[in-house]
Amino acid sequence: MQSLQPVINGEEPDNIFVYGKTGVGKTAVTEYLTNELSQSASHYDIDLSILTISCKGANTSYQTAIRLVNERRSSDEQLSQAGHAEWKVYDALWEELDALGGTILIVLDEIDNIRDDELLYQLSRARSENNITECKLGVIGISNDLTYRDRLNAEVRSSLGEKTVFFPPYDANELRDVLQRRANLAFQDGALAPGVLQLCAAFGAKDSGDARKAITLLRESGDLARNENADQVTEDHVERARETVETEEVVEGIGENLSENEQLTLYALATLTAQSATPARTRRVYERYTQLANAAGREPVSNRRIRDFLAELESMNIVQQQQQSGGTNGNYNEHEIVHDVDDVLRGLTEVLEAVGVHDSVTQHVTFHGGGDGDTFTTGTNTTS
Ligand SMILES: Nc1ncnc2c1ncn2[C@@H]1O[C@H](COP(=O)(O)OP(=O)(O)OP(=O)(O)O)[C@@H](O)[C@H]1O
Ligand SMILES: [Mg+2]
């Protein structure tokens, strides 16, 4: 609120950088406060416009600038996604902003999707460079990548001169409040057994203070109770819904957070699981990984890297490893997947499409992706 106050004073707005982990209310609170601000502005007769853009899927400044222009243009005047000289896009943007006039706040949500600094650089200098003359401009950047700001070019950082607002994770009490208000709207009186909200809040608070997680769990618990025609949502529903939510998190995490080689490593272990060959020694996983990488036309990485990947997969709770003693060369590790192999394969969809479906897992894979759908074999004889 402090950072937004200059708008009401008719001064040049501050640039603001909002950051914090996922689900801690950055988007929700920014929306809430900019709405409040709009109301105060109209009360004080201040000409204020808020332009909010999600940068999701816009990987460059160029694409985001086009989105901003299009946000202001009617449907028959939209800029196409590509094929313009960069300066023309910025010229169009300045023209739109000046035409709008007054004070303009540009909210760039999920700004960390933009890989280059150009847009921030341009926006922060637009007024001093006289690119805009008819409006005052402020930028609110929102990011869940805590390192994003530090990665900006020093020149951009200095011309932005922004205020940073850090959103800490919610604790369980705060999450309970958030959930309580949702519950009042979404559930009949008495539909939630005592303890249900606490349990959902504790789950959200556990590792990251994530409100989205807590809300999702409450919703899933409610769905489960309704599907079972239960009179009440109970702690037991929450416990079971939690398993579903956690599994879905793992499935999504595989596709989103793992590199291709990590996915191939996991795929290797999944095929071994399907062949009942797990727990499997590192060497055996490496062998299968090499076969899969070759099938995908990729240069396999070293055995040592695979060991690192397996340790990483363990730290993400996807795989567990156990040290066994007494091999020919001393101790050795054995690995196995801690989830249902079908769930893991769901997370690996993209890699499966690229590599093909290994014959060991054909019964487990129900989708027919964009690939040619061929299955292939790498041989099942083990050498260990
Ligand atoms: N203080 C709050 N009061 C009510 N609802 C909240 C509050 N904070 C967060 N929420 C709700 O929690 C969910 C996640 O919040 P939000 O989308 O703002 O997170 P975020 O910090 O923007 O996350 P991300 O970095 O993933 O975009 C939303 O459904 C939002 O409405
Ligand atoms: Mg958000």
Image: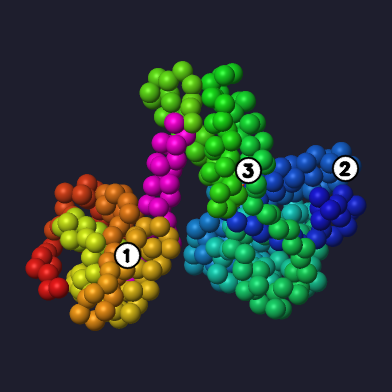
Prevailing SS of the magenta stretch: helix
Q: Which residue is mark 3?
A: 172
Q: Earlier in the sequence, mark 1 or mark 3?
A: 3
At 57% from the left edge and 26% from the top edge, which residue is drawn?
Answer: 194
Q: Secondary structure at mark 3?
A: helix
Q: Earlier in the sequence, mark 2 or mark 3?
A: 2
Circle on res. 380 = none
- Taking depth in this image into account, of 71 and 282 the one nearest to the observer is 282
At 26% from the left edge and 52% from the top edge, which residue is drawn?
Answer: 341
- In this rendering, which labeled residue sits more in front, label 1 or label 3? 1
Q: Which residue is mark 2?
A: 45
At 71% from the left edge and 78% from the top edge, which residue is drawn?
Answer: 155
- 170 shown above or below 136: above
Picture coordinates of residue 362, whole percent (x, y): 16, 53
- Taking depth in this image into account, of 56 and 61 the one nearest to the observer is 56
Picture coordinates of residue 357, whole percent (x, y): 19, 58
Q: Which residues are magenta?
A: 236-263
Q: Earlier in the sequence, mark 2 or mark 1?
A: 2
Circle on res. 322 = 1
- In this rendering, which labeled residue sits more in front, label 2 or label 1? 1
- Taking depth in this image into account, of 121 and 88 the one nearest to the observer is 121
- Taking depth in this image into account, of 147 and 331 the one nearest to the observer is 331
Q: Secondary structure at mark 1?
A: strand
Q: Amino acid at mark 2?
A: Asp
